Structures are given as structure tokens and as C-alpha cells.
Amino acid sequence: MSTRRSVLVVAVLVVALFSSFALGQAPDDRGFDPTGVWYGQHGPLALMRAGDTLSFSYSAVFGATAHLCDGIGVAGFAGDGKWEYVDEQGTVTFTTKGGLVTMQTTKGIASFCGANWPGDTFAKDGWKPAFRCRVIEPKARFLIVGSLPPAPRKGFVVKGDWVEAIGLVNEGSPAWLLTRFVGKKQTTAGLLERDALECHEE
């Protein structure tokens, strides 16, 4: 009797597992989707997740002598809800777990903050979601999230497409929005020119 019961339990678990995959609910260790603007201990952080990339824009003031952070870039997925932004000066790790976002230097220094930056923490009560925008230009090409002015990418959207968008918080970036387009096969994130979009909530 116990053998039949064990077989039945295993069968139920297998059916549940395949049902989860069929519904697109396979296990995901990327943590929650933090897309939006977060307000932390030292300043605002804009995040946009797409696949295994996490685009960010960060501005902050820290320390007794008011050091400044002014950063923009793309972090890559590193496993277990962690994302790493790596450049020649060091590695900054973002963690998106348990409804909390953290930033910390895990190697060298944060190039966009300098030495002695203590990292930052962002709670859900300081979060503002992305807003929706409609493309109004015949064709709007995505731009690379990084140094400004940004360079073009291959991906683009066309008039009538809808994207999710958030404003950049680093300096010198009012002409662009950090955006995400969810297509039938993949999700694309990057910068789009603000003038190419009609935004309904900002």
C-alpha cells in the first residue's frame, strides 16, 4: 500500500513540474524584478531588468565631505539574485532579493563613486514603478546604456509600440529614458530618445 502511495505522490509531483514549465513558471534565481526608481540612503537608483541584464542609473551624495556618485551602465546576472557591473576599476554587485535592493563594492572601487563609498540599500517603500510610453516616431532605435551620449544598438521599435520607461537619475541624461520593450520572443532594454515617445505617467 505504501509503495502505491509513493508512486502516486511521485506522479503528482512530475505532473506539477511539467505544468509549471508549460505555464512559463520554471524556477528563476534572478530574484524579483526591481524595474523602477528606488530611493535609498544616499540617492536614487533607476533599474530596468531584461533577461540576464540589469541596466542602472545612479546618483548619490555620501560622506562628510559630500562625495558624489554619478553612474550609468549594465550589470550582468551572476546567480542567486545577484548582478555584477564590472569595469577596469572594480566590481559593483546589485542584489534583488526579498523585496530589497542593495548595491555594494565587491572588488576594487566603484568607478562612478570613488573610494570609500559605503554602498546603498533600497527598501520597497522607496520605490516608484515604471510608466508606459507609446512610440510616436516611425522608427526609434535603442541606444546603449553606458557613457553619454549613447551609441545606437541594432534593436528598434516602431510607431504605435508600447514600452515601459523610467527616467534616468544620473547627470547629463534628460534627453533619454531607460526603456524596456517586451516582444513575443524576447525583451529588449536600452535608452530611447524622450522626444520619440509619448508618455502617459511620469
Image (cartoon, rainbow, N blue to C red):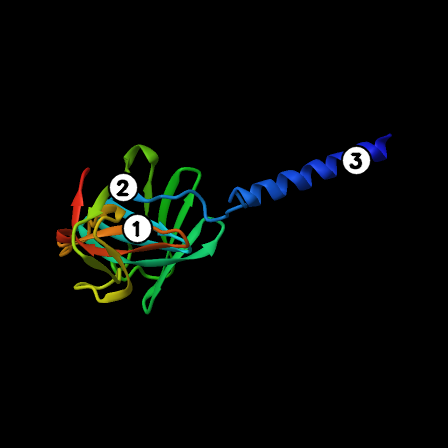
Relative height, residue 191 to residue 20 (above, below): below
Image mark for residue 180:
1
> Is residue 118 in view?
no
Residue type at mark 1?
Arg
Q: Which residue is mark 2?
A: 130
Left or right of 88, for residue 52: right
Tell me if mark 1 has few (under 14), some (14-19) or many (20+) residues whose alpha carbon lies within 10 angstroms of its own: many
Image mark for residue 153:
none
Between 79 and 7, the residue placed more toward the observer is 7
The residue at the point 39 percent across, 44 percent down is 33
Residue 119: % across, % down = 32, 49
Residue found farthest to the right: 1
Image mark for residue 6:
3
Which quarter of the picture shows residue 124?
Answer: top left
- Which quadrant of the rendered structure holds the C terminus? top left
Q: Are marks 2 and 1 in contact (CB under 8 Å)?
A: yes
Relative height, residue 99 to residue 144 (above, below): above
- Which quadrant of the rendered structure holds the N terminus? top right
Residue type at mark 3?
Ser
> Is residue 189 in view?
yes
Residue 59: % across, % down = 21, 50
CA distance separating discs 3 and 1:
46 Å
Residue found farthest to the bottom: 88
The residue at the point 54 percent across, 45 percent down is 27
CA distance separating discs 3 and 2:
47 Å
CA distance separating discs 2 and 1:
10 Å
